[in-house]
Image (spheres, helix red, strand yellow):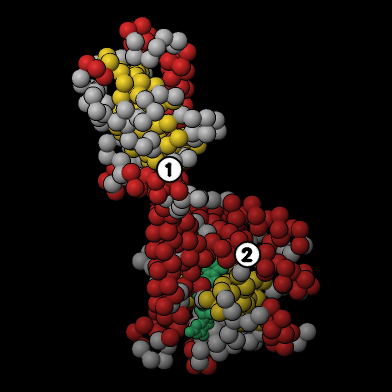
Amino acid sequence: MNKFQRGALAALLIVIVVTAALAPAGIGFLLAERSRRQERVELLNTAAAAALFRAEDVTRRLSGALGEIGKVSATPCSTIYLHELRRIALTHTQVRDAGAYDHDGRWQCSSLLGAVSAGTLEGLTLPAPDWRSRDGVSAWYALSRLPGGKESLVMGRDGFYVAADPSLYLDGRDNASAPASLAVINTEASRVIARTPATDTAAILAVYRTPSPGPDCASWVVRRSVSLPLAVVVSAPHQTFRQRVSTLPWGWLLGGMGAGLACAGWAAWFIVRRLSPRGQLSDAVRRHQFIVAYQPIVDLATRRCVGAEALVRWKHHDRIVRPDHFIPLAEHGGLIQAITDQVLDTVLFELGEFLKRYRDYYVSVNLSVPDLTTHRFLDVLRPAVARVGVRPQQIRIEATERSFLDAAAAKEVISAFRDAGHAVYLDDFGTGYSSLSHLQNFRVDGLKIDKSFVDTIGQDAASSSVASHIVDMAETLDVQVIAEGIEREEQAAYLQARGAKFGQGWLFSPPLSAAEFIRYASRTRGH
Ligand code: C2E
Ligand code: CA
Ligand code: CA
Protein backbone atom coordinates (compact mmCIF):
# COMPACT_ATOMS: atom_id res chain seq x y z
CA MET A 1 0.00 0.00 0.00
CA ASN A 2 1.48 3.33 -0.98
CA LYS A 3 1.29 6.62 0.95
CA PHE A 4 -1.71 7.85 -0.98
CA GLN A 5 -3.63 4.61 -0.46
CA ARG A 6 -2.80 4.66 3.24
CA GLY A 7 -4.04 8.25 3.50
CA ALA A 8 -7.25 7.34 1.65
CA LEU A 9 -7.73 4.35 3.93
CA ALA A 10 -7.21 6.46 7.05
CA ALA A 11 -9.75 9.00 5.75
CA LEU A 12 -12.19 6.20 4.96
CA LEU A 13 -11.77 4.75 8.43
CA ILE A 14 -12.38 8.13 10.04
CA VAL A 15 -15.54 8.59 7.95
CA ILE A 16 -16.74 5.10 8.91
CA VAL A 17 -16.08 5.63 12.61
CA VAL A 18 -17.69 9.08 12.70
CA THR A 19 -20.69 7.96 10.65
CA ALA A 20 -21.19 4.85 12.70
CA ALA A 21 -21.01 6.81 15.92
CA LEU A 22 -23.25 9.66 14.84
CA ALA A 23 -25.79 7.81 12.72
CA PRO A 24 -27.41 5.92 15.61
CA ALA A 25 -27.42 9.10 17.68
CA GLY A 26 -29.02 11.05 14.82
CA ILE A 27 -31.57 8.35 14.14
CA GLY A 28 -32.24 8.02 17.87
CA PHE A 29 -32.75 11.77 18.12
CA LEU A 30 -35.19 11.81 15.18
CA LEU A 31 -37.11 8.83 16.55
CA ALA A 32 -37.23 10.42 19.99
CA GLU A 33 -38.50 13.69 18.46
CA ARG A 34 -41.12 11.81 16.48
CA SER A 35 -42.37 9.84 19.42
CA ARG A 36 -42.40 12.99 21.53
CA ARG A 37 -44.52 14.76 18.91
CA GLN A 38 -46.88 11.82 18.79
CA GLU A 39 -47.07 11.80 22.55
CA ARG A 40 -47.79 15.52 22.55
CA VAL A 41 -50.55 15.16 19.95
CA GLU A 42 -52.08 12.31 21.92
CA LEU A 43 -51.90 14.34 25.10
CA LEU A 44 -53.48 17.33 23.40
CA ASN A 45 -56.22 15.17 21.87
CA THR A 46 -57.03 13.74 25.28
CA ALA A 47 -57.05 17.19 26.83
CA ALA A 48 -59.23 18.56 24.00
CA ALA A 49 -61.73 15.70 24.34
CA ALA A 50 -61.97 16.27 28.11
CA ALA A 51 -62.34 20.04 27.66
CA LEU A 52 -65.05 19.64 25.03
CA PHE A 53 -66.94 17.17 27.21
CA ARG A 54 -66.85 19.67 30.06
CA ALA A 55 -67.93 22.60 27.85
CA GLU A 56 -70.88 20.58 26.50
CA ASP A 57 -71.79 19.46 30.01
CA VAL A 58 -71.72 22.99 31.45
CA THR A 59 -73.74 24.33 28.50
CA ARG A 60 -76.34 21.57 28.88
CA ARG A 61 -76.64 22.14 32.61
CA LEU A 62 -77.11 25.88 32.15
CA SER A 63 -79.76 25.18 29.45
CA GLY A 64 -81.41 22.78 31.87
CA ALA A 65 -81.51 25.44 34.58
CA LEU A 66 -82.90 27.93 32.05
CA GLY A 67 -85.57 25.41 31.08
CA GLU A 68 -86.54 24.98 34.74
CA ILE A 69 -87.01 28.75 35.17
CA GLY A 70 -89.25 28.67 32.09
CA LYS A 71 -91.50 26.22 33.87
CA VAL A 72 -92.01 28.45 36.93
CA SER A 73 -95.64 29.56 36.73
CA ALA A 74 -95.51 32.31 39.35
CA THR A 75 -95.64 35.96 38.29
CA PRO A 76 -92.09 37.02 37.31
CA CYS A 77 -90.24 38.66 40.16
CA SER A 78 -92.99 37.92 42.65
CA THR A 79 -91.86 36.58 46.00
CA ILE A 80 -92.72 33.02 44.95
CA TYR A 81 -90.90 33.55 41.64
CA LEU A 82 -87.80 34.80 43.44
CA HIS A 83 -88.01 31.89 45.81
CA GLU A 84 -88.06 29.53 42.85
CA LEU A 85 -85.11 31.32 41.26
CA ARG A 86 -83.09 30.85 44.42
CA ARG A 87 -84.01 27.21 44.58
CA ILE A 88 -82.90 26.69 40.97
CA ALA A 89 -79.66 28.60 41.55
CA LEU A 90 -78.96 26.50 44.61
CA THR A 91 -79.73 23.15 43.04
CA HIS A 92 -77.62 23.86 39.96
CA THR A 93 -74.13 24.35 41.29
CA GLN A 94 -73.00 25.84 37.98
CA VAL A 95 -75.54 28.64 38.25
CA ARG A 96 -74.22 31.69 40.04
CA ASP A 97 -77.35 33.79 39.66
CA ALA A 98 -80.74 33.58 37.96
CA GLY A 99 -83.13 36.38 37.17
CA ALA A 100 -85.51 38.12 34.81
CA TYR A 101 -85.47 41.08 32.42
CA ASP A 102 -88.20 42.80 30.42
CA HIS A 103 -88.50 42.85 26.65
CA ASP A 104 -86.25 45.95 26.49
CA GLY A 105 -83.54 44.08 28.34
CA ARG A 106 -84.03 45.99 31.60
CA TRP A 107 -83.31 44.07 34.72
CA GLN A 108 -86.31 43.00 36.74
CA CYS A 109 -85.01 40.77 39.46
CA SER A 110 -82.17 38.45 40.52
CA SER A 111 -81.91 35.45 42.80
CA LEU A 112 -79.01 37.15 44.53
CA LEU A 113 -80.39 40.68 44.90
CA GLY A 114 -84.15 40.29 44.68
CA ALA A 115 -86.47 42.63 42.82
CA VAL A 116 -85.28 45.68 40.87
CA SER A 117 -87.37 47.76 43.19
CA ALA A 118 -84.75 46.89 45.81
CA GLY A 119 -82.69 49.53 44.02
CA THR A 120 -79.40 47.82 43.09
CA LEU A 121 -80.44 46.73 39.63
CA GLU A 122 -82.45 49.75 38.86
CA GLY A 123 -81.66 51.22 35.45
CA LEU A 124 -79.47 48.26 34.44
CA THR A 125 -80.04 47.12 30.90
CA LEU A 126 -78.57 44.08 29.22
CA PRO A 127 -76.55 44.88 26.11
CA ALA A 128 -77.25 43.17 22.78
CA PRO A 129 -76.38 39.48 23.19
CA ASP A 130 -73.12 38.14 21.81
CA TRP A 131 -75.01 35.31 20.22
CA ARG A 132 -78.60 34.29 19.63
CA SER A 133 -79.64 30.76 18.75
CA ARG A 134 -82.35 29.83 16.32
CA ASP A 135 -84.56 28.62 19.19
CA GLY A 136 -84.37 31.96 21.00
CA VAL A 137 -81.53 31.46 23.48
CA SER A 138 -79.32 34.51 23.89
CA ALA A 139 -75.85 34.46 25.31
CA TRP A 140 -73.64 37.16 26.77
CA TYR A 141 -70.05 36.28 27.32
CA ALA A 142 -68.06 38.14 29.91
CA LEU A 143 -70.81 40.30 31.24
CA SER A 144 -69.44 42.28 34.15
CA ARG A 145 -72.42 44.36 35.25
CA LEU A 146 -74.26 41.54 36.88
CA PRO A 147 -74.85 41.12 40.57
CA GLY A 148 -71.67 40.22 42.41
CA GLY A 149 -69.68 42.37 40.02
CA LYS A 150 -67.70 39.43 38.62
CA GLU A 151 -67.48 38.66 34.95
CA SER A 152 -70.27 36.26 34.08
CA LEU A 153 -71.44 34.14 31.24
CA VAL A 154 -75.16 34.68 30.83
CA MET A 155 -77.70 32.58 28.99
CA GLY A 156 -81.20 34.01 28.65
CA ARG A 157 -84.53 33.21 27.01
CA ASP A 158 -88.00 34.70 27.07
CA GLY A 159 -87.08 37.31 29.68
CA PHE A 160 -85.23 35.18 32.22
CA TYR A 161 -81.56 34.22 32.51
CA VAL A 162 -78.96 32.17 34.31
CA ALA A 163 -75.47 33.45 34.95
CA ALA A 164 -72.37 31.32 35.50
CA ASP A 165 -68.70 31.72 36.13
CA PRO A 166 -66.98 31.38 32.70
CA SER A 167 -64.08 29.57 34.33
CA LEU A 168 -66.44 26.58 34.78
CA TYR A 169 -65.57 25.78 31.18
CA LEU A 170 -61.95 25.57 32.11
CA ASP A 171 -62.09 23.61 35.32
CA GLY A 172 -60.62 20.18 35.74
CA ARG A 173 -57.34 21.37 34.25
CA ASP A 174 -55.25 20.53 37.24
CA ASN A 175 -54.42 17.03 36.05
CA ALA A 176 -51.22 15.95 34.34
CA SER A 177 -52.62 16.08 30.84
CA ALA A 178 -53.68 19.73 31.22
CA PRO A 179 -52.70 21.74 28.15
CA ALA A 180 -50.82 24.98 28.44
CA SER A 181 -53.76 26.99 27.19
CA LEU A 182 -57.40 26.23 26.55
CA ALA A 183 -60.15 28.24 24.97
CA VAL A 184 -63.82 27.42 24.43
CA ILE A 185 -65.36 28.98 21.33
CA ASN A 186 -68.89 29.55 20.18
CA THR A 187 -68.56 28.38 16.62
CA GLU A 188 -71.60 30.22 15.30
CA ALA A 189 -70.56 33.56 16.72
CA SER A 190 -66.83 32.90 16.40
CA ARG A 191 -66.50 34.23 19.93
CA VAL A 192 -64.27 33.01 22.68
CA ILE A 193 -66.52 31.95 25.57
CA ALA A 194 -63.78 31.20 28.05
CA ARG A 195 -60.02 31.03 27.98
CA THR A 196 -57.12 30.36 30.27
CA PRO A 197 -55.44 33.54 31.50
CA ALA A 198 -52.37 33.67 29.31
CA THR A 199 -54.27 32.75 26.17
CA ASP A 200 -54.41 35.34 23.44
CA THR A 201 -57.96 35.54 22.05
CA ALA A 202 -56.91 36.69 18.59
CA ALA A 203 -54.32 33.92 18.31
CA ILE A 204 -56.84 31.28 19.38
CA LEU A 205 -59.40 32.46 16.85
CA ALA A 206 -56.72 32.48 14.15
CA VAL A 207 -55.84 28.90 15.02
CA TYR A 208 -59.48 27.92 15.09
CA ARG A 209 -60.09 29.42 11.65
CA THR A 210 -57.07 27.74 10.06
CA PRO A 211 -58.62 25.11 7.80
CA SER A 212 -55.88 22.50 8.21
CA PRO A 213 -53.15 22.04 10.76
CA GLY A 214 -49.89 23.71 9.89
CA PRO A 215 -46.44 22.17 10.06
CA ASP A 216 -46.40 22.72 13.79
CA CYS A 217 -49.58 20.68 14.18
CA ALA A 218 -48.28 19.12 17.35
CA SER A 219 -48.54 22.43 19.19
CA TRP A 220 -52.33 22.85 19.12
CA VAL A 221 -55.51 20.86 18.58
CA VAL A 222 -59.05 22.02 17.70
CA ARG A 223 -62.04 19.86 18.55
CA ARG A 224 -65.62 20.69 17.57
CA SER A 225 -68.82 19.55 19.20
CA VAL A 226 -71.20 17.63 16.98
CA SER A 227 -74.32 18.56 18.95
CA LEU A 228 -73.64 22.14 20.12
CA PRO A 229 -72.07 25.17 18.45
CA LEU A 230 -68.96 24.70 20.54
CA ALA A 231 -65.30 24.05 19.88
CA VAL A 232 -62.26 23.87 22.07
CA VAL A 233 -58.74 24.88 21.14
CA VAL A 234 -55.94 23.51 23.25
CA SER A 235 -52.27 24.19 22.79
CA ALA A 236 -49.15 22.70 24.23
CA PRO A 237 -46.54 24.88 25.83
CA HIS A 238 -43.53 25.76 23.72
CA GLN A 239 -40.60 23.77 24.94
CA THR A 240 -37.25 25.44 25.20
CA PHE A 241 -34.21 23.76 23.68
CA ARG A 242 -33.07 22.92 27.20
CA GLN A 243 -36.37 21.24 28.02
CA ARG A 244 -36.22 19.27 24.77
CA VAL A 245 -32.67 18.14 25.51
CA SER A 246 -33.53 17.17 29.06
CA THR A 247 -36.44 15.00 27.92
CA LEU A 248 -34.44 13.14 25.28
CA PRO A 249 -34.10 9.39 25.86
CA TRP A 250 -30.44 9.70 26.70
CA GLY A 251 -30.11 6.03 27.60
CA TRP A 252 -31.08 5.02 24.08
CA LEU A 253 -29.01 7.74 22.45
CA LEU A 254 -25.86 6.93 24.38
CA GLY A 255 -26.49 3.22 23.93
CA GLY A 256 -26.89 3.78 20.18
CA MET A 257 -23.71 5.81 20.05
CA GLY A 258 -21.86 3.16 22.01
CA ALA A 259 -23.15 0.40 19.75
CA GLY A 260 -22.27 2.48 16.68
CA LEU A 261 -18.77 3.09 17.96
CA ALA A 262 -18.33 -0.57 18.78
CA CYS A 263 -19.46 -1.55 15.27
CA ALA A 264 -17.22 1.09 13.73
CA GLY A 265 -14.31 -0.04 15.84
CA TRP A 266 -14.89 -3.59 14.78
CA ALA A 267 -15.19 -2.56 11.10
CA ALA A 268 -12.02 -0.48 11.34
CA TRP A 269 -10.19 -3.29 13.09
CA PHE A 270 -11.42 -5.73 10.44
CA ILE A 271 -10.35 -3.46 7.56
CA VAL A 272 -6.99 -2.70 9.11
CA ARG A 273 -6.46 -6.37 9.79
CA ARG A 274 -7.46 -7.34 6.28
CA LEU A 275 -5.25 -4.69 4.76
CA SER A 276 -2.33 -5.20 7.10
CA PRO A 277 0.62 -7.11 5.65
CA ARG A 278 -0.29 -10.10 7.81
CA GLY A 279 -3.94 -9.88 6.74
CA GLN A 280 -2.94 -9.79 3.10
CA LEU A 281 -0.56 -12.70 3.52
CA SER A 282 -3.26 -14.67 5.27
CA ASP A 283 -5.53 -13.86 2.33
CA ALA A 284 -2.83 -15.12 -0.02
CA VAL A 285 -2.65 -18.40 1.89
CA ARG A 286 -6.41 -18.78 1.65
CA ARG A 287 -6.36 -18.04 -2.05
CA HIS A 288 -3.29 -20.14 -2.86
CA GLN A 289 -1.43 -17.20 -4.34
CA PHE A 290 2.00 -18.83 -4.15
CA ILE A 291 4.05 -20.07 -7.03
CA VAL A 292 7.30 -21.96 -6.99
CA ALA A 293 10.51 -21.30 -8.90
CA TYR A 294 13.09 -24.07 -9.33
CA GLN A 295 16.75 -23.23 -9.25
CA PRO A 296 18.80 -26.02 -10.78
CA ILE A 297 21.53 -27.68 -8.71
CA VAL A 298 24.35 -28.95 -10.88
CA ASP A 299 27.23 -31.35 -10.64
CA LEU A 300 30.21 -28.97 -10.77
CA ALA A 301 32.38 -31.47 -12.67
CA THR A 302 29.94 -32.37 -15.44
CA ARG A 303 27.62 -29.30 -15.18
CA ARG A 304 24.75 -31.69 -15.41
CA CYS A 305 21.61 -30.90 -13.46
CA VAL A 306 20.97 -33.19 -10.50
CA GLY A 307 17.98 -31.48 -8.99
CA ALA A 308 16.50 -28.16 -7.98
CA GLU A 309 15.75 -26.03 -4.97
CA ALA A 310 12.12 -25.03 -4.68
CA LEU A 311 11.87 -21.28 -4.02
CA VAL A 312 8.53 -19.83 -3.19
CA ARG A 313 7.14 -16.57 -4.62
CA TRP A 314 3.99 -14.67 -3.75
CA LYS A 315 1.92 -13.60 -6.73
CA HIS A 316 0.41 -10.44 -5.32
CA HIS A 317 -1.64 -8.22 -7.65
CA ASP A 318 0.40 -9.16 -10.72
CA ARG A 319 3.58 -8.54 -8.76
CA ILE A 320 5.98 -11.26 -7.76
CA VAL A 321 7.05 -10.81 -4.13
CA ARG A 322 10.32 -12.46 -3.18
CA PRO A 323 10.40 -14.75 -0.15
CA ASP A 324 12.77 -12.53 1.81
CA HIS A 325 9.93 -10.02 2.01
CA PHE A 326 7.27 -12.30 3.39
CA ILE A 327 8.82 -15.45 4.90
CA PRO A 328 9.82 -13.66 8.14
CA LEU A 329 6.26 -12.28 8.38
CA ALA A 330 4.81 -15.73 7.66
CA GLU A 331 7.02 -17.21 10.37
CA HIS A 332 5.90 -14.56 12.85
CA GLY A 333 2.25 -14.68 11.85
CA GLY A 334 1.89 -18.43 12.09
CA LEU A 335 1.37 -18.85 8.35
CA ILE A 336 4.60 -20.53 7.34
CA GLN A 337 3.35 -24.09 7.76
CA ALA A 338 0.47 -23.50 5.38
CA ILE A 339 2.89 -21.97 2.89
CA THR A 340 5.29 -24.94 3.18
CA ASP A 341 2.37 -27.28 2.49
CA GLN A 342 1.40 -25.29 -0.60
CA VAL A 343 4.99 -25.34 -1.85
CA LEU A 344 5.07 -29.13 -1.45
CA ASP A 345 1.74 -29.52 -3.23
CA THR A 346 2.96 -27.33 -6.09
CA VAL A 347 6.25 -29.19 -6.40
CA LEU A 348 4.49 -32.56 -6.55
CA PHE A 349 1.88 -31.24 -8.93
CA GLU A 350 4.33 -29.57 -11.31
CA LEU A 351 7.27 -31.94 -11.13
CA GLY A 352 5.67 -35.13 -9.84
CA GLU A 353 5.57 -36.78 -13.25
CA PHE A 354 9.10 -35.63 -14.05
CA LEU A 355 10.46 -36.99 -10.78
CA LYS A 356 8.65 -40.26 -11.28
CA ARG A 357 10.17 -40.62 -14.71
CA TYR A 358 13.70 -39.56 -13.76
CA ARG A 359 14.37 -41.13 -10.41
CA ASP A 360 17.83 -39.62 -9.90
CA TYR A 361 16.55 -36.01 -9.78
CA TYR A 362 15.47 -34.42 -6.57
CA VAL A 363 13.86 -31.23 -5.39
CA SER A 364 14.82 -29.69 -2.08
CA VAL A 365 12.30 -27.80 -0.02
CA ASN A 366 13.10 -25.06 2.53
CA LEU A 367 11.65 -25.57 5.99
CA SER A 368 11.20 -23.11 8.84
CA VAL A 369 11.27 -23.45 12.62
CA PRO A 370 7.80 -24.92 13.24
CA ASP A 371 8.32 -27.69 10.71
CA LEU A 372 11.63 -28.64 12.26
CA THR A 373 10.34 -28.89 15.81
CA THR A 374 7.39 -31.20 15.25
CA HIS A 375 6.55 -34.14 13.04
CA ARG A 376 3.67 -32.27 11.41
CA PHE A 377 5.32 -31.69 8.04
CA LEU A 378 6.72 -35.19 7.93
CA ASP A 379 3.17 -36.46 8.46
CA VAL A 380 2.07 -34.35 5.47
CA LEU A 381 5.08 -35.21 3.33
CA ARG A 382 5.07 -38.97 3.74
CA PRO A 383 1.56 -39.67 2.37
CA ALA A 384 1.86 -36.95 -0.29
CA VAL A 385 5.02 -38.44 -1.72
CA ALA A 386 3.54 -41.94 -1.60
CA ARG A 387 0.33 -40.77 -3.32
CA VAL A 388 2.21 -39.22 -6.24
CA GLY A 389 4.62 -42.14 -6.47
CA VAL A 390 7.80 -40.13 -5.98
CA ARG A 391 10.61 -41.74 -3.97
CA PRO A 392 11.29 -40.14 -0.56
CA GLN A 393 14.90 -39.59 -1.65
CA GLN A 394 13.64 -37.25 -4.35
CA ILE A 395 12.32 -34.70 -1.87
CA ARG A 396 15.07 -33.23 0.26
CA ILE A 397 14.94 -30.84 3.16
CA GLU A 398 16.87 -27.60 3.68
CA ALA A 399 17.06 -26.34 7.25
CA THR A 400 18.74 -23.13 8.35
CA GLU A 401 20.47 -22.69 11.67
CA ARG A 402 17.63 -20.42 12.78
CA SER A 403 15.50 -23.52 12.92
CA PHE A 404 17.63 -25.10 15.61
CA LEU A 405 16.53 -22.94 18.52
CA ASP A 406 15.08 -26.01 20.13
CA ALA A 407 18.07 -28.17 19.39
CA ALA A 408 16.73 -31.35 20.97
CA ALA A 409 13.47 -31.22 19.05
CA ALA A 410 15.24 -30.33 15.78
CA LYS A 411 17.65 -33.20 16.23
CA GLU A 412 14.80 -35.61 16.69
CA VAL A 413 12.77 -34.29 13.73
CA ILE A 414 15.82 -34.22 11.44
CA SER A 415 16.58 -37.84 12.19
CA ALA A 416 12.91 -38.70 11.55
CA PHE A 417 13.13 -37.06 8.09
CA ARG A 418 16.31 -38.97 7.37
CA ASP A 419 14.80 -42.22 8.56
CA ALA A 420 11.90 -41.62 6.20
CA GLY A 421 14.37 -41.34 3.33
CA HIS A 422 14.52 -37.55 2.97
CA ALA A 423 18.03 -36.15 2.86
CA VAL A 424 18.55 -33.11 5.10
CA TYR A 425 20.87 -30.20 4.28
CA LEU A 426 22.13 -27.44 6.54
CA ASP A 427 21.31 -24.25 4.65
CA ASP A 428 23.32 -21.00 4.66
CA PHE A 429 26.11 -22.89 6.32
CA GLY A 430 28.70 -20.72 8.00
CA THR A 431 26.52 -17.67 8.55
CA GLY A 432 25.34 -18.60 12.05
CA TYR A 433 27.29 -18.57 15.28
CA SER A 434 27.35 -22.29 15.82
CA SER A 435 27.33 -23.89 12.39
CA LEU A 436 30.19 -26.12 13.35
CA SER A 437 28.65 -27.34 16.56
CA HIS A 438 25.44 -28.12 14.68
CA LEU A 439 27.39 -30.16 12.25
CA GLN A 440 28.73 -32.11 15.20
CA ASN A 441 25.38 -32.53 16.95
CA PHE A 442 23.12 -33.35 14.05
CA ARG A 443 23.51 -36.09 11.56
CA VAL A 444 22.80 -34.39 8.22
CA ASP A 445 23.34 -35.42 4.62
CA GLY A 446 24.91 -32.26 3.37
CA LEU A 447 25.50 -28.56 3.79
CA LYS A 448 25.02 -25.58 1.57
CA ILE A 449 27.87 -23.09 1.63
CA ASP A 450 26.34 -19.66 1.92
CA LYS A 451 26.60 -17.29 -1.01
CA SER A 452 28.54 -14.76 1.10
CA PHE A 453 31.56 -17.14 1.14
CA VAL A 454 31.26 -17.86 -2.54
CA ASP A 455 31.04 -14.12 -3.36
CA THR A 456 34.53 -13.48 -1.97
CA ILE A 457 36.24 -16.19 -3.93
CA GLY A 458 38.96 -14.61 -6.00
CA GLN A 459 38.62 -11.27 -4.19
CA ASP A 460 39.49 -11.67 -0.54
CA ALA A 461 41.98 -14.39 0.23
CA ALA A 462 41.00 -14.70 3.91
CA SER A 463 37.29 -15.20 3.46
CA SER A 464 37.50 -17.20 0.28
CA SER A 465 39.47 -19.76 2.23
CA VAL A 466 36.39 -20.21 4.47
CA ALA A 467 34.62 -21.92 1.58
CA SER A 468 37.63 -24.14 1.09
CA HIS A 469 37.69 -25.05 4.79
CA ILE A 470 34.01 -25.86 4.82
CA VAL A 471 34.57 -28.23 1.91
CA ASP A 472 37.44 -29.90 3.74
CA MET A 473 35.39 -30.29 6.87
CA ALA A 474 32.45 -31.71 4.96
CA GLU A 475 34.73 -34.26 3.42
CA THR A 476 36.01 -35.25 6.85
CA LEU A 477 32.47 -35.62 8.15
CA ASP A 478 31.46 -37.40 4.98
CA VAL A 479 28.64 -35.02 4.06
CA GLN A 480 27.83 -33.57 0.69
CA VAL A 481 28.52 -29.92 -0.22
CA ILE A 482 26.44 -27.65 -2.39
CA ALA A 483 27.89 -24.20 -3.00
CA GLU A 484 25.25 -21.48 -3.37
CA GLY A 485 25.24 -18.27 -5.38
CA ILE A 486 27.90 -19.15 -7.93
CA GLU A 487 27.87 -16.32 -10.43
CA ARG A 488 31.29 -16.57 -12.05
CA GLU A 489 33.19 -19.32 -13.73
CA GLU A 490 36.21 -18.77 -11.52
CA GLN A 491 34.10 -19.42 -8.40
CA ALA A 492 32.87 -22.70 -9.88
CA ALA A 493 36.40 -23.73 -10.84
CA TYR A 494 37.79 -22.82 -7.40
CA LEU A 495 35.12 -24.70 -5.51
CA GLN A 496 35.38 -27.70 -7.73
CA ALA A 497 39.15 -27.73 -7.35
CA ARG A 498 38.70 -27.66 -3.52
CA GLY A 499 36.46 -30.70 -3.70
CA ALA A 500 32.93 -29.21 -3.70
CA LYS A 501 30.79 -31.54 -5.76
CA PHE A 502 27.61 -29.54 -6.35
CA GLY A 503 26.76 -25.95 -7.03
CA GLN A 504 23.86 -23.62 -7.63
CA GLY A 505 23.80 -20.07 -8.95
CA TRP A 506 23.20 -17.73 -11.81
CA LEU A 507 26.27 -19.02 -13.58
CA PHE A 508 24.26 -22.15 -14.28
CA SER A 509 20.72 -20.89 -14.10
CA PRO A 510 18.46 -18.48 -12.25
CA PRO A 511 15.33 -19.90 -10.63
CA LEU A 512 13.03 -21.23 -13.37
CA SER A 513 9.45 -22.19 -13.89
CA ALA A 514 8.69 -25.92 -13.79
CA ALA A 515 8.55 -26.20 -17.59
CA GLU A 516 11.80 -24.24 -17.97
CA PHE A 517 13.45 -26.39 -15.35
CA ILE A 518 12.43 -29.59 -17.14
CA ARG A 519 13.86 -28.19 -20.38
CA TYR A 520 17.06 -27.13 -18.58
CA ALA A 521 17.48 -30.57 -17.01
CA SER A 522 16.91 -32.32 -20.34
CA ARG A 523 19.40 -30.05 -22.08
CA THR A 524 22.18 -30.62 -19.53
CA ARG A 525 21.49 -34.33 -19.23
CA GLY A 526 20.64 -34.99 -22.84
CA HIS A 527 17.31 -36.74 -22.31
P1 C2E B 1 18.08 -19.58 0.14
O1 C2E B 1 17.52 -20.86 0.61
O2 C2E B 1 19.50 -19.30 0.47
O3 C2E B 1 17.81 -19.53 -1.38
C1 C2E B 1 18.71 -19.09 -2.28
C2 C2E B 1 18.42 -17.68 -2.64
O4 C2E B 1 19.50 -17.17 -3.37
C3 C2E B 1 17.21 -17.58 -3.57
O5 C2E B 1 16.61 -16.33 -3.34
C4 C2E B 1 17.85 -17.54 -4.93
O6 C2E B 1 17.06 -16.95 -5.91
C5 C2E B 1 19.09 -16.74 -4.66
N1 C2E B 1 20.18 -17.03 -5.60
C6 C2E B 1 20.51 -18.22 -6.19
N2 C2E B 1 21.57 -18.11 -6.98
C7 C2E B 1 21.97 -16.83 -6.89
C8 C2E B 1 23.05 -16.09 -7.49
O7 C2E B 1 23.89 -16.61 -8.28
N3 C2E B 1 23.16 -14.78 -7.17
C9 C2E B 1 22.29 -14.18 -6.32
N4 C2E B 1 22.47 -12.89 -6.06
N5 C2E B 1 21.26 -14.85 -5.74
C10 C2E B 1 21.12 -16.16 -6.02
P2 C2E B 1 15.14 -16.27 -3.06
O8 C2E B 1 14.41 -17.15 -3.99
O9 C2E B 1 14.80 -14.83 -3.02
O10 C2E B 1 15.00 -16.89 -1.66
C11 C2E B 1 15.45 -16.19 -0.57
C12 C2E B 1 15.32 -17.01 0.66
O11 C2E B 1 13.95 -17.25 0.99
C13 C2E B 1 15.87 -18.40 0.53
O12 C2E B 1 17.23 -18.36 0.68
C14 C2E B 1 15.19 -19.15 1.62
O13 C2E B 1 15.85 -18.94 2.85
C15 C2E B 1 13.85 -18.48 1.67
N6 C2E B 1 12.89 -19.32 0.98
C16 C2E B 1 12.68 -19.45 -0.33
N7 C2E B 1 11.68 -20.34 -0.55
C17 C2E B 1 11.25 -20.76 0.66
C18 C2E B 1 10.27 -21.69 1.10
O14 C2E B 1 9.57 -22.32 0.32
N8 C2E B 1 10.11 -21.86 2.45
C19 C2E B 1 10.91 -21.21 3.32
N9 C2E B 1 10.71 -21.45 4.61
N10 C2E B 1 11.85 -20.34 2.97
C20 C2E B 1 12.04 -20.13 1.64
CA1 CA C 1 17.64 -22.86 0.75
CA1 CA D 1 20.90 -20.73 1.35
Residue carrying label 1: 190
Q: Quarter of the image holding residue 454? A: bottom left
Q: Quarter of the image holding residue 423? A: bottom right
Q: Quadrant of the C terminus?
A: bottom right
Looking at the rendered structure, which numbered label has been put on residue 123? none
**Real-space CA distance between mark 2 and mark 1, rounded to the nearest whole angstrom:** 81 Å
Image coords of residue 123 (percent x, y)? 24, 28
Category of crowding for the residue at label 1, using alpha-carbon neighbours closer than 10 angstroms: few (below 14), some (14–19), many (at least 20): some
Q: Quarter of the image holding residue 87? A: top left
Disc 2 or disc 1, which is closer to the eye? Answer: 1
404 relative position to 111: left or right: right
* Mark 2 residue type: Arg
Residue carrying label 2: 287
| Helix, strand or loop under label 2 | loop
Q: Residue at x 34, y 84 (%)?
A: 462
Vertical placement of residue 502 versus 283, above or below: below
Residue 244 seen in render: no
511 relative position to 190: left or right: right
Category of crowding for the residue at label 2, using alpha-carbon neighbours closer than 10 angstroms: few (below 14), some (14–19), many (at least 20): few
| Helix, strand or loop under label 1 | loop
* Mark 1 residue type: Ser
Image coords of residue 326 (percent x, y)? 48, 69
First-in-chain label (2 vs 1): 1
Vertical placement of residue 490 versus 125, above or below: below
470 relative position to 248: left or right: right
Image coords of residue 107 (percent x, y)? 30, 24
Q: Nearest the camera: 263 or 434?
A: 263
